[in-house]
Image (tube, helix red, strand yellow):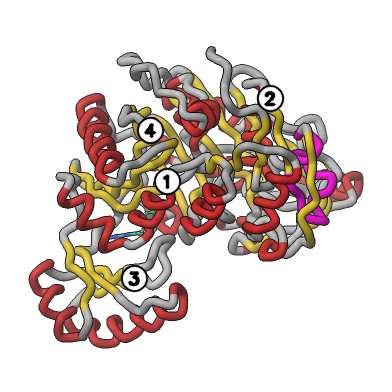
């Protein structure tokens, strides 16, 4: 590889993604600078970096969201570039242009591309003109009467969306004409509240679509490639829980079509760097939803099935290197699944769970990747995104990947903080998931996955063993081992489980 013009990068983030970027830097012979808030003083991203800079108190607005401090830290440390990770300032066009104005490289797209994709009706028009299929819908509608006319043209049910939207805020389904008046008023005031812009538009409402997205990479010379799709439907309240590549419903022909369309989107906004074009898929049709102008949480599943290091590519591209390679026609190779391990208690409505991580034993073995932002002894606080780590597996095909993920989840041991681990174990045993029958409503369609501990299934000996385990660990036990008989390899709800070797653990389904 030719000598890169970058020798030091400031990582303007924390947690697992900051660790991921630090790792990419080290492999490329680039020094990394970690920034940290007070409670993150001993966090893994700080421990692993070459240089560290304190940037203030826990409150994100005074640390990780303070663009001025981050740019000062880059100057102070002689960094030539800033990697924003995801979240925080990653899709803030003002921050991106402030970085450029300071004479630094922003490891991401041009600010204009961030801005163009931020305004939804503008993005839709841009995409439509580029030949990208968009969901049938309207421009922004100023009055209830305009909304009614547009809804009649599009056909009920419709969805009202905020022009300044994204992430699901200010969205409203309108099933029939009667509901339009109040939905219009509410959507506008919600949009005003959330974004300071009351404008709304409408689209035909798609029921139970799949969320499928295409990963792209583009250089500043106009070369662009796509790395295929990720299936990201399994989510709750717009937080993804499980992602995989390839998508069960996408064959080579559809991948090629979606990939071409994604590259048209890239061209239309003058995109550079790594990015993701999101689609809703329903019954063989797909429609542009939005473009994420950043590195995404779920990028590893694409890395596993292509062998491309997306973060290293992103850094190379930011340094001005040409893309310089072609996608391999053999992609995707095998199958990859990612489970997000977050500090949320799935038994209690995914309530945030905070506290000290007393014990942490990550899984290992063939095809297992553990991207974590925490270590034993770390205090998980309430200030930041609850994502603790990502468990990623790669195997020959989807069935093998599910078996491998289930095996890895059963090996994982976390004590001190409740996590989404048991939810994931339940999904890996659920029939619809096995059959690839998923949609954005998968979690609400499967309330049994959240049924919680079924005490009546436990006999006295088991309860005694569980209590003993809890006492030994000084904390509520994290269920990691499905207990009791299973039918056809699936769990009926997710059951109390305990550590291998702690008591009479039998092989589950
Ligand atoms: C939709 C939709 C159904 N029909 N648009 C949610 C976030 C926002 N960016 C777009 N979203 C949706 N738009 C139409 N016309 C359903 C959703 C949606 C969704 C989309 C992707 C991933 C998760 C989702 C969860 C709920 C709703």
Q: Report the residue at 38% width, 76% height from top.
A: 197
Label 2, label 4: how far apart the Cα atoms are: 24 Å
User: Which residue was labeled with disc 1?
Assistant: 110
Q: Nearer the viewer, residue 470 or 139?
A: 139
**Residue range of the region highlighted in magenta in the rendering:** 35-49
Q: Nearer the viewer, residue 404 or 217?
A: 217
Can residue 460 be seen by looking at this rendering? Answer: no
Say if mark 2 contacts mark 1, CB within 8 Å: no
Q: Report the residue at 31% width, 42% height from top.
A: 270
Q: For the residue labelled by badge 3, is the local secondary structure a helix, a strand or a loop?
A: strand
User: Which residue was labeled with disc 4?
Assistant: 220
Return the disc, 2 or 1, that comes first in the chain's sequence.
2
Q: Nearer the viewer, residue 423 or 371?
A: 371
Say whether mark 3 is within 8 Å of ligand 1.
no
Position of the C terminus by quadrant? top right
User: Which residue was labeled with disc 2?
Assistant: 26
- The quadrant holding residue 204 is bottom left
Q: Residues within 10 Å of mark 1 (few under 14, many from 20)?
A: many
């Amino acid at each position: 590889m030719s000598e890169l013009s970058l020798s030091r990068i400031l990582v303007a983030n924390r947690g697992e993604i900051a660790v991921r970027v630090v790792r990419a830097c080290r492999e490329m012979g680039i020094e990394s600078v970690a920034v940290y808030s007070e409670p993150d003083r001993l966090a893994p991203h700080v421990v692993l970096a070459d240089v560290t800079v304190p940037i203030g108190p826990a409150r994100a607005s005074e640390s990780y969201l303070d663009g001025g401090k981050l740019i000062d830290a880059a100057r102070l440390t002689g960094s030539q570039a800033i990697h924003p990770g995801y979240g925080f300032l990653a899709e803030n066009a003002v921050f991106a242009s402030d970085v450029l104005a300071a004479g630094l490289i922003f490891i991401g797209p041009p600010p204009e591309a961030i801005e163009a994709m931020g305004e939804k009706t503008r993005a839709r028009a841009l995409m439509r003109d580029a030949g990208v299929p968009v969901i049938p819908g309207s421009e922004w509608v100023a009055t209830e009467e305009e909304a009614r006319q547009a809804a009649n043209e599009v056909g009920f049910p419709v969805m009202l969306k905020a022009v300044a939207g994204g992430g699901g805020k200010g969205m409203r389904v309108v099933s029939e004409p009667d509901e339009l008046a109040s939905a219009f008023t509410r959507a506008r005031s919600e949009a005003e509240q959330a974004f300071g812009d009351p404008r709304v538009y409408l689209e035909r409402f798609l029921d139970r679509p799949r969320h499928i997205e295409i990963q792209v990479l583009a250089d500043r010379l106009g070369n662009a490639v796509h790395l295929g799709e990720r299936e990201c439907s399994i989510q709750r309240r717009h937080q993804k829980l499980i992602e995989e590549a390839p998508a069960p419903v996408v064959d080579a022909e559809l991948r090629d079509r979606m990939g071409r369309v994604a590259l048209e989107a890239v061209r239309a906004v003058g995109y550079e760097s790594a990015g993701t074009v999101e689609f809703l898929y329903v019954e063989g049709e797909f429609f542009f939803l939005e473009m994420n102008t950043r590195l995404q949480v779920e990028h590893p599943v694409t890395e596993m099935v292509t062998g491309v290091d997306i973060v290293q590519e992103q850094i190379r591209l930011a340094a001005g290197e040409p893309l310089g390679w072609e996608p391999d026609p053999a992609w995707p190779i095998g199958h990859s699944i990612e489970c997000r391990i977050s500090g949320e208690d799935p038994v209690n409505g995914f309530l945030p769970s905070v506290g000290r991580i007393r014990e942490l034993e990550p899984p290992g073995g063939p095809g297992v990747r553990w991207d974590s932002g925490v270590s034993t002894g770390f205090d998980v606080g309430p200030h930041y995104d609850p994502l603790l780590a990502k468990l990623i597996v790669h195997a020959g095909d989807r069935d093998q990947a599910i078996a491998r993920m289930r095996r890895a989840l059963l090996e994982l041991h976390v004590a001190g903080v409740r996590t989404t681990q048991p939810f994931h174990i339940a999904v890996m045993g659920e029939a619809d998931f096995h059959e690839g029958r998923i949609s954005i409503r998968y979690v609400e369609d499967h309330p049994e996955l959240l049924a919680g501990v079924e005490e009546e299934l436990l006999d006295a000996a088991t309860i005694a063993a569980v209590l003993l385990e809890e006492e030994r660990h000084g904390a509520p036990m994290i269920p990691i081992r499905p207990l009791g008989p299973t039918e056809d390899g699936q769990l009926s709800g997710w059951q109390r489980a305990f550590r291998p070797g702690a008591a009479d653990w039998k092989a589950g389904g």
